[in-house]
Image (cartoon, helix red, strand yellow):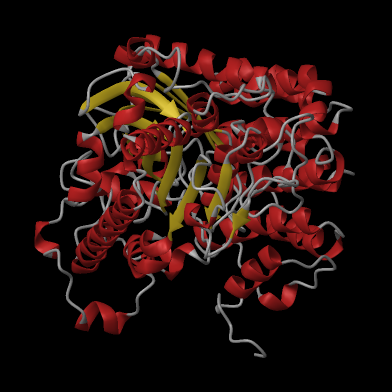
Amino acid sequence: MIRLLLASFGVLLSCVASVSAADRPNVVWIVSEDNSHHYLAHFFEGGAAAPQIEALAAHGLTFDHAYSNAPVCSVARTTLATGCYGPRIGTQFHRRYVPAAMPEGLRMFPALLRQAGYYTSNNSKKDYNAIEGEGVWDESSRQASWRKRSDASQPFFHMQSHAQSHESSLHFNRATFEDEKTATDPETVKLADYHPDTPLFRYTHARYLDRMAIVDQIVGETVEKLKEDGLLEDTFIFYFGDHGGVLPRSKGYLYDSGVHVPLVVRVPENFKHLADGDFGDRVAGFVSFVDFAPTVLNLAGVDIPTQIDGRTFLGQGIAMKEVNGRDQVFCYADRFDEKYDFVRSLHKGRFQYLRCYQPYLPDGINNNYRYKNLAYAQWREMYESGELSGAATQFFEPKEPELLYDCEADPHQVNNLAGDPQYESVLLEMRSLLQNRVKSLPDLSFYPESHLTQHAMGNPVAFGLDHRAEIAELVEIADLALLPFEEARPRLEEALKSPNAMKRYWAATACASFGLAAVSLASDAEPLVRDESMPVRIRAAEFLGQVGTINPQEVLIEVVNTTKNPVEATEALNAVVWFKDFFDDRYGVNRSDFHPIALGADIDDRLNYINGNPYPKKGK
């Protein structure tokens, strides 16, 4: 009888321990780098089969409209860690010059989990554009794991990133292309509508589908570890890509190929009540990276800070019917390494609207790291030799200020509907929604990065709030580019002469957006090439160089050689390379023209490219 009682007591203790261990769910994020949803058959026709990822989905939920907010890792990952829109908190530039201070009173969400008793581990990529602060991770390293927590009953959040699908996996050389076969038959791949159909593009696509098979295997290995530890049915497993990619015209761009990511969430048996819906359901509602932090906090029962921009899509009190009613996502793209552009986008239902604030800059303007990819280089060579036609040429030509795509009818986004009268009401609605969004954030990118690094990064949120009214005025000046020129002309003429440098800056940018249509304002813009503000000089040179009234390189070279601010030098060099490569040799430059005072990696990248050797060997 005593033995029986003791045995029963032991079983009871075991049950109590089990209940305690499963009191709050664990969360694991498995993140593959640089892959949009286009490369998995579970999401997109022509993608790779992924039985392990599909098994997660069969025991959970598939999110058909998940977006990374930004198309590049440092910006996207900072969005994940903070739950905040990058342009609001100053983290929107890839490879930040100055890390942004976190919003006052806010910590990265793993720190909030730690504070609530969770073990937090990261294996191992961070890549933040904000100051991390203390206490975010119990461990962040290549050895970090939930298995290293000292108390097996402690709930955990674990994030692991996998570079097997990173764009560098496509930086193979000509010998690899000629000698190494892919498991995927290149003849069977479905190329994007904007890619030229060449053996190299087919091989590159096939090689990337092979990488997705490796990622799928990694997912399976992680699930098996959780199963071995007896934790699988206490753990939510998120699998997703850290942004889109990685074939040409994806990573770094706001088209769906750059931001529409795969997302599946395996729901554990012991916490089914925290996920409304049935195993295997597909969620039609729109979610994005700003939503991930509040979602994990909600699953863990942790209060969600008011400074967070995102909305929860799983956990207590979240009905899937409401989530499925969400149909909008805001995304942003700014500087990518040494390449500048300024684009904002809004998805709403089946449509995506993109506002290109520097439409005169082609997507294909050089970026050294990107053009390591042989397919990128071949694409540019074919354009320059006149071998392309149709959608394949768009990447190397100026954009329209507004782009509108029907993502269901045109999944590769090559047919711009912005000028189609049939879609005028859609265009005007989405234009208004985006205008309101950038004003209400407020969006800090209406100041050039060189200005923000000098004046805003100690408290970007406060800077934005203090300048909200001015930002709204700058948005209005920028959007004069959306009007017929004669209607916009009086206000542009006034803004070009404004005592406010940022208004002059945006007036010159709008003139550059009009191009030759605004040539009558050239005489008003010419004094700006001697403006006290270097960014204004750069924008004036971009406009006047387009219309042919000056040699813009003289202005830009002087900026590069005289500014002490490396960000201003980088901004000027972006225009230098644009004029060098896209104006039929009218505006050539040599490396010997440049003697910069300011130093930096982005300056080096531009000058090395101008010198014809983007990646010189060390010591050469």
Q: Is residue 516 left or right of residue 131?
A: left
Residue in front for this viewpoint, 234 or 144: 234
Point 86% across, 62% down: residue:
562
Point 31% across, 58% down: residue:
218
Residue in front for this viewpoint, 249 or 181: 181
Question: In which quadrant will I find the N terminus?
Answer: top left
Residue 177, position as x, y percentages in the image = 25, 77
* Vertical placement of residue 540 versus 312, above or below: below
Q: Taking the image as drawn, is residue 479 in sight?
A: yes
Question: In which quadrant will I find the C terminus?
Answer: bottom right
* Vertical placement of residue 265 versus 560, above or below: above
Residue 67, position as x, y percentages in the image = 42, 34
Residue 82: image quadrant is top right
Residue 425, position as x, y percentages in the image = 39, 9
* Vertical placement of residue 120 versus 353, above or below: below
Point 32% across, 24% down: residue:
272
Residue 271, position as x, y percentages in the image = 36, 27
Q: Residue furthest bottom?
A: 619
Residue in front for this viewpoint, 114 or 558: 114
Residue in front for this viewpoint, 8 or 477: 8
Q: Is residue 150 left or right of residue 379?
A: right
Residue 436: image quadrant is top right
Q: Taking the image as drawn, is residue 333 in sight?
A: no
